[in-house]
Amino acid sequence: MSTAGPAETPPRAARLRDGLVVILALTTGAVNAVTFLRLGKVFASVMTGNLALFGVATAQRDGGFAINAGVALAGYCLGVLAGATMARAPRAGQPTWPRRVTVTLAVELIMLAGFSGGWLALAGHPSGGGQLALLAVASAAMGMQATAVRRLGQMSSTYLTSTVTGLFEALAARRWPPSWPRSSGTVGALVAGAICGGVAAVQAPAAVPAAVMVPLAVVLACRLPAAATRARSR
């Protein structure tokens, strides 16, 4: 595989990378919908929103809500720490999709599998300590995904405020950057994932594992063979 840096990324490899990032946003949307609807009205990956919710809960002296926001924040931060250790920082001359990104996402899938097992064990209606545990695991998984995607360059599949800002800036300037298909795709995919996750959480709890795991599994199915080939060639 080519080791060209971001400025020399082969177009086909870049399109594949961007498509996989869009697919990852489906998992993000689904996980956030489930945590918001069933795990305490907080988000697994939107830490700006959780910080604001923590402040609101503190102002209203709502201890339970503050705990939920705090657990999501703590889980996400732990996920970032673990993901950064595995994925490491971007470097010049790295492949379009480094093997460590695949490894980090594989660990995320294992975590979401654990989340799904706990969700099913609690019949899709967690409460108390079980709810907090699931929230922590989901948030940690999102932290790992965020770090893995950051290794790919200036892009995200978990927090999209800057992505939306960039899209509307481009609209105002009537000048579309090369990354606009990925940017618009991730926004649309996050909404679609949230719809799927929300419907599953409310109407078909047994389908939640599929909603949160299938998109990530598809990404790994695309990348694991390449990662294994690169590992054997060393």
Image: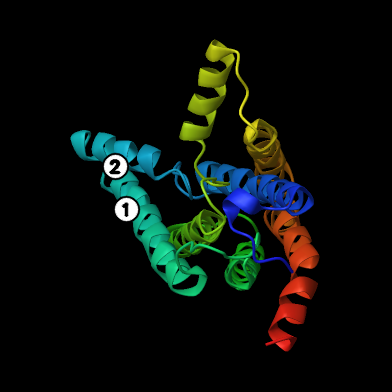
Residue 46 picture quarter: top left
Q: Where residue 78 sits: x, y (%)?
A: 38, 66
Q: Can see residue 122?
A: no
**SS class of the residue under badge 1?**
helix
| Labelled pair 2, 1 in contact (Cβ < 8 Å) | yes
**SS class of the residue under badge 2?**
helix
- Nearest the eye: 145 or 199: 145
109 lies above or below 125: below
Residue 22 picture quarter: top right
Question: Is 37 situated left or right of 176 in this image?
Answer: left
Q: Where residue 80 sits: x, y (%)?
A: 42, 62
Q: Amino acid at mark 2?
A: Phe
84 lies above or below 10: below
Separation of marks 2 and 1 at Cα, in angstroms: 7 Å
Q: What residue is disc 1 on?
A: 70
Question: Is 125 situated left or right of 205 in this image?
Answer: left
Q: Can see residue 149?
A: yes
Q: Residues within 10 Å of mark 1 (few under 14, many from 20)?
A: some
Q: Where residue 98 sits: x, y (%)?
A: 62, 67
Q: What residue is disc 2 on?
A: 54
For the point 75% across and 54% down, the residue is: 13
Residue 90, disc: none
